[in-house]
Amino acid sequence: MKELFVSAWDMLIFRPHAYEQHAARPDVFKAGLLLLLVVTLVAGALSFAIGLVNDLIPARVDAQREETRAWIENPLERLGPLGRDIDLPPEFRRQMPDILAGLEIGLGIDELKTPLPRPIGRVLSNVGTFLSSPLNRLAGWMGYTLWVLLAAKLLGGRSTLPRMLGTTAVYSVPHVLGVLGFVPCLGGLLALVSLGWGIAIYVKAVSAANEFSIGRAVAATALPIIALIVLTLPLALIPIIGALVSA
């Protein structure tokens, strides 16, 4: 396990020959899969823990109702002095009773009895979401990588499916930064960093697994996306063209 994480660190910093050494492992698929699962769980662990604590705290429905009502009736108060100089549109004022009625309906639904005590039901729901997150990432990664492997084969790549999957799985490691995803502003910035970093790692992994150049790896990585755009764009344009013709 320690050797695997040392190897992952070497690939994160693009150390020479790190990708080739990882791709040559006899257990490359198992190692890559383990990395992806661990990273996904770690990335969501802190948000899960915070949500778990919130689920165990009894909900104060009356306080929530008053707080939400105050925010809806005076949304500009949160802007401080700046909000005092802004007038809400008359349309918003007219819709206020409907908005408040919807609020009461939502809070009433939330107070309905459930088969399990409410905190337990919420905890189990969050546990299920947390444990299923690696499966969601796994499905997306495997599906996309199959198409990338096909494109790589057309470009002269020599990777096998287990080798391709085990090597490209390292793309998930930068996403461990998602552990701070709940932090305002910082979470979004870290998401962009991990996305760009992960793409760079994925391209390098495709190159190492198929033993060809970075240029071909970029092409193999991009071809499935380009093909998807080419196939779906005409379908998206059909309603627009139909509206223009009928106008």
Image (cartoon, rainbow, N blue to C red):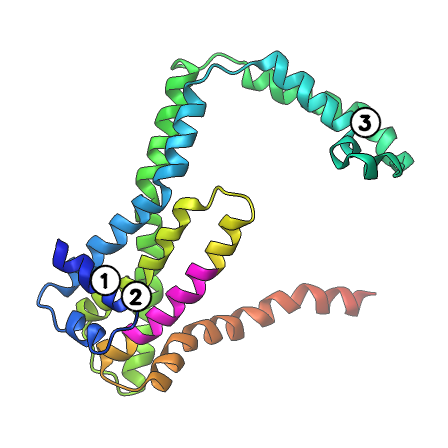
Q: Which residue is mark 1?
A: 8
Q: Which residue is mark 2?
A: 12
Specify the segment rendered in magenta: 193-205
What is the x, y in percent for residue 165?
A: 24, 65
* Residue closer to the observer: 230 or 40: 40
Q: Is residue 198 magenta?
A: yes
* Residue closer to the observer: 177 or 58: 177
- Mark-to-mark CA distance, 2 and 3: 52 Å
Magenta stretch, overall SS: helix
Q: Residue at 17% across / 62% down in the picture?
A: 29
What is the x, y in percent for residue 221?
A: 38, 75
Q: Residue at 30% across / 61% down in the picture?
A: 142
Under mark 3, the amino acid is: Met
Dot 2 or dot 3: first in sequence order is: 2
Q: Is residue 139 above or below residue 239?
A: above
Under mark 2, the amino acid is: Leu
Helix, strand or loop at label 1? It is helix
Dot 3 or dot 1: first in sequence order is: 1
Task: Name which quarter of the figure residue 3 lies in.
Answer: bottom left
Q: Are marks 1 and 2 in contact (CB under 8 Å)?
A: yes
Q: Residue furthest front?
A: 81
